[in-house]
């Protein structure tokens, strides 16, 4: 069983007529995703290889019955795109755009949470999500996934998501849903949001969680795992070799004192009962051992 998206998800691409939006929309459609519309103000009435383009999200949803949106617009317009998607009534919004100012993120993430608590917002600055064999909404390479479960994956890192999925697939371990939540300071969806869904999903028997240095989300997730989860979790924390006192990578990777370090996160996760790899290539091996034990 998939979480968040499935074979019935109908997607609107905000920014379809741009180069990035067009490329990934057609790629997702080729994978089997139901890409039913695009939105670009002023381009309504046109199409992109048979995908109709509308001027507004409301028009697109009314015209096609879409229930999800993926956003490929420049950073300065990303907030407006999220507001428009949320107000149109779609239940899933995936914002791929990177470089969105943190104060914009704080505004639209909290707007969606308050005004539409049942709407799932993933991102910004994320690779999206895929339920292998059913639907791909984002920029993840569907070719490296394996349908059928039994592993759910959630990750702050984009590229490490791909590596972890590849490691699992190479060992014949399928995935139920893989979610890249993004590494910005104000994510629309966090670890606990996804882990709780995996815990409730009967087809997910184990989880992979990939964190990074900076912030305290991994420590908070570790407390949730210890108290609420019955399914085993294999984890990896990027940034073990990061020099002390240095800002590494994107805006989310900021270490404050002893908080947010890879060592602190690994310690918390291991105390919660997780198997924690020391390099990304161990994820598949550890998961294979975990699945044998259950």
Image (tube, rainbow, N blue to C red):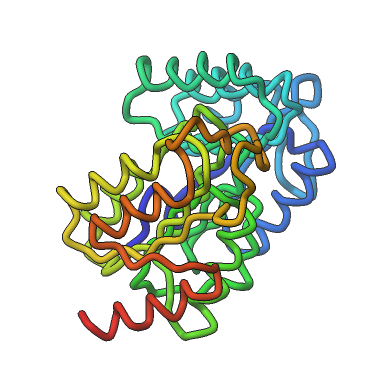
Q: Quadrant of the C terminus?
A: bottom left
Query: Which residue reaches farthest right?
Result: 19
Report x, y in % for residue 184. Answer: 57, 33
Q: Residue at position x 54%, y 36% from top?
A: 123
Report x, y in % for residue 10. Answer: 51, 45
Q: Residue at position x 70%, y 49% from top?
A: 25
Side of 240 relative to 3 (left or right): right
Count of numbered marks: 0
Report x, y in % for residue 252. Answer: 57, 34
Report x, y in % for residue 87. Answer: 48, 18
Does 6 appear above or below 13? below
Does 60 appear above or below 96? above
Does 203 appear above or below 172? above
Q: Residue at position x 71%, y 45% from top?
A: 51
Which one is nearer the viewer's eye here, 259 or 113?
259
Q: Quadrant of the N terminus?
A: bottom left
């Amino acid at each position: 069983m998939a979480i968040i998206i499935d074979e019935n998800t109908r997607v609107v691409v905000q920014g379809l007529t741009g180069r990035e939006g067009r490329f990934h929309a057609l790629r997702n459609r080729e994978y089997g995703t139901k890409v039913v519309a695009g939105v670009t103000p002023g381009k309504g009435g046109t199409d992109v290889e048979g995908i109709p383009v509308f001027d507004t999200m409301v028009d697109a949803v009314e015209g096609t019955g879409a229930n999800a949106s993926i956003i490929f617009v420049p950073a300065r317009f990303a907030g407006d795109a999220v507001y428009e998607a949320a107000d149109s009534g779609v239940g899933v919004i995936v914002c791929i755009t990177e470089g969105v100012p943190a104060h914009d993120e704080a505004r639209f993430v909290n707007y969606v949470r308050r005004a539409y608590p049942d709407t799932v917002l993933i991102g910004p600055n994320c690779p999206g999500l895929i339920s292998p064999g059913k639907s791909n909404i984002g920029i993840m390479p569907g070719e490296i996934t394996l349908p059928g479960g039994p592993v759910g994956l959630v990750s702050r890192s984009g590229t490490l998501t791909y590596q972890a999925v590849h490691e699992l697939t190479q060992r014949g371990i399928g995935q139920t849903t893989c979610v890249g939540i993004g590494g910005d300071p104000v994510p629309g969806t966090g670890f606990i949001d996804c882990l709780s869904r995996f815990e409730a999903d009967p087809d997910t028997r184990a989880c992979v969680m990939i964190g990074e240095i900076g912030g305290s989300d991994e420590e908070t997730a570790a407390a949730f795992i210890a108290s609420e989860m019955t399914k085993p979790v294999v984890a990896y924390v990027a940034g073990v070799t990061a020099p002390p006192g240095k800002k590494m990578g994107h805006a989310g990777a900021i270490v404050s004192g002893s908080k947010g370090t890879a060592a602190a996160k690994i310690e918390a996760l291991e105390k919660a009962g997780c198997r924690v790899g020391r390099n990304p290539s161990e994820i598949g091996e550890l998961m294979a051992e975990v699945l044998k034990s259950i």
